[in-house]
Image: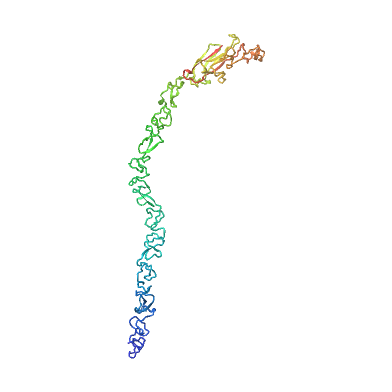
């Protein structure tokens, strides 16, 4: 039977399992013998009188043996106490250990944890299992700001670790200042309240943005507070009076004559609008305005009614750049000059001269050569003509008019000059030679020199000092003995008197003179009234000896200037008559 070559009748181990038939509890079964390993098969494999008996815990897990744990509450989970068995035996009936309370069939690793019942229901060492019955969603809140991340959460009985908030929505779980409970702060680069925008209405630091439908930068009165523009809430300035026209808004330049209030100031075509023209203030209505008072307007407005400037007197309509200049001391045509028009056009013609406008009055500007205005009357022009002596230039001593000569031998040889002093500054110069003829000493008064010369203004009469003469004897460079009289006389002895009734004796300006008598033998006797000294009276220096014939030749040329003491007021007043005569 065991194929060992020994017949079973004689073989003491028929099944060949090494266990003699006498002790082998199954002599015909080679798998059953002493020292065989017990197996879970309903057989006493090791012939110990027990079938499928308990094994040591170290041999569990083979031959059908399994570890059975003590399960006092029969909930299918045992406590750590166990046996290695082929089948449950008594309370060792649970194949799974881990029961943390073997007296409560409701607590074991196989049950669902129930939150907040004071038990570790599934015996995993925690009463806060994820997804436990009645669990709540807790979100990870790593920055501990009370808000968690939407995508990182667990269903727990209570908060644990980072999973500590029931509120989600945190968009930056590394920044405690960012969560849905925060107020948005403008311009910090964060979505502070995690609503998906950094431009919340009413955010801290926000400012009003006005509804601006036409995008012209100005809005209506409706506004909202934002950090920056949002859709049509984009205008920082209000006041748009037409939010459907982007060309109409406050601050825009007004445009002339387009039918719009372009800058929303409540008026159209205001001063300074685009396309405006300069209108000048015309106070006197002469269509000329003041340079310094103008407005740029779309059309005339009030006194700002002319486009032509240049009016220099806007209170007088007769004064403007288009007016003709008149002689009135005004700048009639506003060219910056007064009375600068053509003098003839302003004043008319002037007899013997040309007109001029002076100080707003028509006056004689100049006279034709040889004519003068003496009376100052514009109406009769240059009414006074110079005389022939002026025409020949006898206005200074070097050009004195030559009247020829006279002699004391011909007392009737009188020279008469009729002339004019015009203008008032005029002077007439004449020259005449007075010849001293040889004296015989037999004339009416023996010993008397006949050389007596007189120049006198005889007209007008009385002269009253109006015309005065100045006489220079011998040359133009000679001193003028008298210059403020109208009568000049030169005598060679004391028998003639000068104008003051005193003897002159070759010195017409002497007003008093002692009558000398040559009676002494010496010069001192002559000076002291001594008698007849040949040495005195015959001396060429003794020109004052009375009663003696004096034969020196006194022939000389006289230069006579005639002038007025004051300017004439009429042409007739300029006329005078000078008489030059020898006298005895």
* Number of callouts: 0
* Residue positioned most to the right: 521
Classify 369 as above or below 495: below
Which quadrant, please, contains the C terminus?
top right
In front of the other: 24 or 95 = 95
Q: How is the image coloured?
A: rainbow
Image location (x, y in percent) of residue 261: 34, 42
Residue 556, visible in the rendered structure: yes
In this rendering, the answer to whether 298 lies above or below 498 is below
Residue 138 placement: quadrant: bottom left
Q: Does 529 sit left or right of 259 as displayed?
A: right
419 or 51, which is in the foreground?
A: 51
Q: Quadrant of residue 269?
A: top left
Q: Quadrant of the N terminus?
A: bottom left
Q: Residue 251: horizontal and vertical position, in percent?
A: 38, 44
| 320 or 98: nearer the viewer | 98
Q: x and y percent of residue 463 in the render?
A: 51, 16
């Amino acid at each position: 039977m065991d194929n060992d070559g020994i017949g079973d009748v004689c073989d003491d181990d028929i099944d060949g399992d090494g266990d003699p038939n006498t002790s082998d509890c199954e002599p015909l079964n080679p798998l059953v013998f002493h020292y065989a390993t017990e197996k879970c098969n309903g057989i006493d494999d090791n012939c110990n009188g027990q079938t499928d008996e308990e094994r040591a815990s170290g041999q569990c897990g083979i031959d059908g043996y399994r570890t059975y744990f003590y399960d006092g509450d029969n909930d299918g989970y045992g406590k750590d106490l166990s046996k290695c068995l082929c089948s449950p035996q008594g309370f060792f009936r649970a194949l799974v250990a881990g029961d943390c309370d073997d007296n409560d069939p409701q607590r074991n690793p196989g049950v669902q944890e129930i939150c907040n019942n004071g038990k570790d229901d599934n015996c995993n060492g925690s009463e806060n299992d994820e997804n436990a019955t009645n669990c709540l969603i807790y979100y990870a809140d790593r920055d501990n700001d009370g808000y968690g991340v939407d995508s990182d959460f667990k269903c727990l009985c209570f908060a644990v670790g980072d999973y500590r908030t029931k509120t989600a929505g945190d968009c930056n779980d590394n920044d405690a200042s960012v969560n849905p409970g925060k107020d948005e702060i403008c311009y910090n680069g964060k979505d502070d309240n995690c609503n998906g925008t950094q431009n919340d209405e009413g955010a801290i630091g926000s400012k009003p943005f006005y509804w601006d439908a036409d995008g012209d930068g100005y809005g209506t009165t409706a506004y909202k507070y934002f950090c920056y523009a949002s859709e049509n809430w984009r205008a920082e300035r209000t006041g748009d009076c037409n939010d459907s026209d982007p060309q109409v808004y406050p601050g825009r330049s007004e445009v002339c004559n387009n039918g719009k209030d372009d800058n929303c100031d409540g008026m159209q075509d205001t001063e300074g609008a685009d396309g405006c023209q300069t209108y000048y203030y015309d106070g006197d209505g002469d269509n000329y305005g003041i340079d310094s008072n103008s407005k740029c307007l779309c059309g005339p407005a009030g006194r700002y009614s002319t486009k032509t400037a240049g009016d220099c007197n806007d209170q007088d309509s007769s004064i403007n750049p288009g007016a003709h200049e008149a002689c009135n001391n005004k700048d009639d045509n506003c060219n910056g000059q007064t009375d600068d028009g053509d003098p003839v056009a302003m004043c008319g013609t002037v007899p013997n001269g040309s007109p001029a406008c002076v100080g707003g009055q028509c006056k004689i500007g100049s006279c034709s050569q040889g004519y003068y205005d003496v009376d100052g009357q514009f109406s009769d022009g240059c009414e006074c003509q110079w005389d022939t002596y002026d025409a020949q230039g006898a206005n200074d001593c070097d050009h004195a008019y030559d009247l020829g000569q006279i002699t004391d031998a011909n007392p009737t040889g009188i020279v008469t000059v009729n002339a004019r002093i015009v203008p008032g500054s005029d002077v007439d110069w004449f020259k005449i030679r007075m010849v001293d003829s040889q004296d015989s000493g037999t004339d009416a008064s023996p010993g008397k020199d006949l050389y007596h010369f007189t120049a006198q203004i005889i007209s007008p009469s009385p002269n009253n000092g109006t015309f005065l003469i100045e006489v220079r004897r011998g040359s133009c460079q000679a001193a003028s003995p008298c210059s403020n009289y109208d009568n000049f006389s030169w005598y060679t002895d004391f028998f003639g008197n000068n104008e003051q009734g005193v003897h002159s004796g070759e010195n017409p300006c002497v007003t008093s003179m002692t009558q000398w008598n040559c009676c002494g033998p010496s010069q001192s006797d002559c000076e002291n009234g001594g008698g007849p000294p040949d040495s005195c009276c015959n001396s060429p220096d003794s020109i004052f000896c009375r009663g003696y014939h004096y034969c020196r030749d006194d022939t000389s040329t006289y230069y006579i200037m005639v002038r007025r003491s004051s300017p004439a007021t009429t042409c007739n007043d300029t006329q005078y008559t000078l008489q030059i005569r020898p006298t005895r």
